[in-house]
Image (cartoon, rainbow, N blue to C red):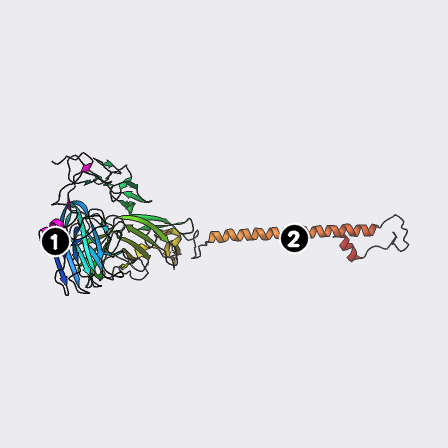
Amino acid sequence: RCQPCAAGTAAVKQLAWPHFEEMAKSSGMPPDFRASCTGACVDAWYYQDYTPGQGMPPSTMLATGKSLSVNSVSILTFSVELYTTGNVSFEYMFVFPGPLPNGHVSFEIKKLDQINPFQFSGDLFPDTSGEAQRFTGPAMPQGLYQLVWTYRKATEDAVYGLRSLVVTGATSGGAPACVPCAPGMYCPPLTDQPHPCPTGAFASSFGQSECAPCPRGTVASSDRSRCNRCPSQMVPDTTQSYCMLQNCRYRLRKPGNSSTWDYDLSSFTLVSTAKGQVSIEDRTKQVSAMYHVGLCSSIEGASTPDGDDVCPQRPQPSFACQSLEGGPPVSLGSEIASILAVDDDNPHMVITFRDGDVCPESHDFARYSVSVELICAPEVHSSGPADEEPPVPDGSTGPILRPTKVDVSMDGTCSFRFVVTAAQACPLCRNDSYYFGLGECRNGRQTKTYFLRPGVKCFGGTPPRVQVVSCSMSMEVELGFNVFTLTVLLVIGVVGALFAALFMVVQRHTQLVNRYQALTVSRAGDATPHEDEDTPRLNSVPCARDDEAEELNL
């Protein structure tokens, strides 16, 4: 008799093979399993008895290798449908004589539908002969899947065996227990699956029967397990599911000082580019891949110039995605991780997005991420298609502006790097980015026009307006001085010269007074007798000559 599950728990179904004895008795592969091989082989996969350990009863595993020649490949495929988010786990073992073999098994999870794509691959290397090892895969969203084991034999008498297999969330399974709902999920009474918290809500612990709304000004995390505040200069969207730029503007502090740059990225609503990339089917064919990045908000619901949807029906908002020929779109980032300003010979900024889809090349279920480097290039412009020359703005004396340049490359196993070169990637121009010139003076008036300073790398902003000024008050030159300023400087110079002359006159007057006093004393003499007979005494002398009288008068 089945027992009902309480609120906060779910009766999640499982397909479970704790061993393969029952399958071995049926003499053949069960439905949904398919075995094949390439090279010389008889039975690609078969049932083999083994003893799990000392004192334990014999068991049966699904094995391969005994009937394979060296360098042959055997493949086991299992098709399964998940009605809810689930995962796969299995036990496996290698049996081989002598030293460690070079052969190994690769395991892949492939989602067969185009909605909510998922793909994972990893290598299973042997550790010790006859020792069981366990593998647990990442969370898999609802859909139809293929589980693929591929064994390449490299050593004689080496065998690989699958000891057990459990697929949680399988449509055709049964529920062995009531499982508490994980954080980010809620479980009403009598449910067979956890339900993700709705947009703008969260559940922070296990066993929740309902979700709580996020406080105002916060957004739910991608797994709906918590609410986060948006980074500086960003605000929640109307659904509180992700952060977006307010008015699509950034204000970033320059590295090493307190001044700031302002950026306006409103023209970067969707940056798209095509590039040759490896096909997801055979990983050898060079095909065309489309890449899309939205720098201001999620690109959910956006369309390419050809009218195709960008990353359609994504479970989470995507700021960046990749579309490969023959495969579903892949999310490269669902939230902004960091925004940095770089101050070198060419000012630019770097925006990093994280929490994309699971990266198939990762062995630890890492997710895709992407960094977008915006390179300032005032001569590069993105107004219009790449094969058209955009018009030169009225009054512009600069070069014709070119379309935006976008380069995409891999920056590691699961990281992409976008380099966007454009004029809009430059900081906004400010008042100090301009100098002015004056037009011809007519009827006492002339125009004052501002021009971008040579060498200044900026774009947009609000340039100073053309002004009509008085010629008498603003006979300006490019250095920024005018007649009034020159007059003030001249007056200051004259006053300074006058003070200097007055100082010299006073100093000369003092010197003459001192000389006059000294001369008077020498004329009067000293009436007191001196012991030294050589000392001059006061005597009556004739009147002074004219030149001496003149000096005395002075």
Q: Is residue 481 left or right of residue 534?
A: left
Residue 232: x, y in percent?
Answer: 33, 44
Marks 1/2: CA–CA distance: 113 Å
Query: Quick one: 150 or 221, which is closer to the camera?
Result: 150
The quadrant of the image that shows the N terminus is top left
What residue is shown with label 1? 33
> Which region shows up in magenta?
1-30
Q: Main secondary structure of the magenta part?
A: loop
Q: Amino acid at mark 2?
A: Met
The stretch drawn in magenta includes residue 25? yes
Asked if 225 appears above or below 424 in the picture, the reply is above
Q: Is residue 88 depicted above or below 178 in this figure?
A: below
Q: Residue at x 59, y 53 (%)?
A: 497
Badge 1 crowding class, 10 Å Cα cut-off, few under 14, some 14 to 19, many 20 or more, is: some
Residue 141 percent location from the top left of the image: 18, 47
Nearest the viewer among 439 and 326 is: 326
Percent x, y of residue 512: 72, 52
What residue is disc 2 on?
504
Label 2 Cα crowd, 10 Å radius (few <14 / some 14-19 / many 20+): few
Q: Secondary structure at mark 2?
A: helix
Residue 399 picture location, percent across and down: 31, 62
Answer whether residue 368 is magenta in the image: no
Determine the residue located farthest toward the front in the rendered image. Answer: 55
Residue 265 shows in this picture: no
Q: Is 462 positioned to the left or the right of 201 in the image?
A: right
Q: Secondary structure at mark 1?
A: strand
Q: Earlier in the sequence, mark 1 or mark 2?
A: 1
Looking at the picture, which amino acid does disc 1 mark? Phe
Give 4 or 451, whichever is nearer the viewer.
4
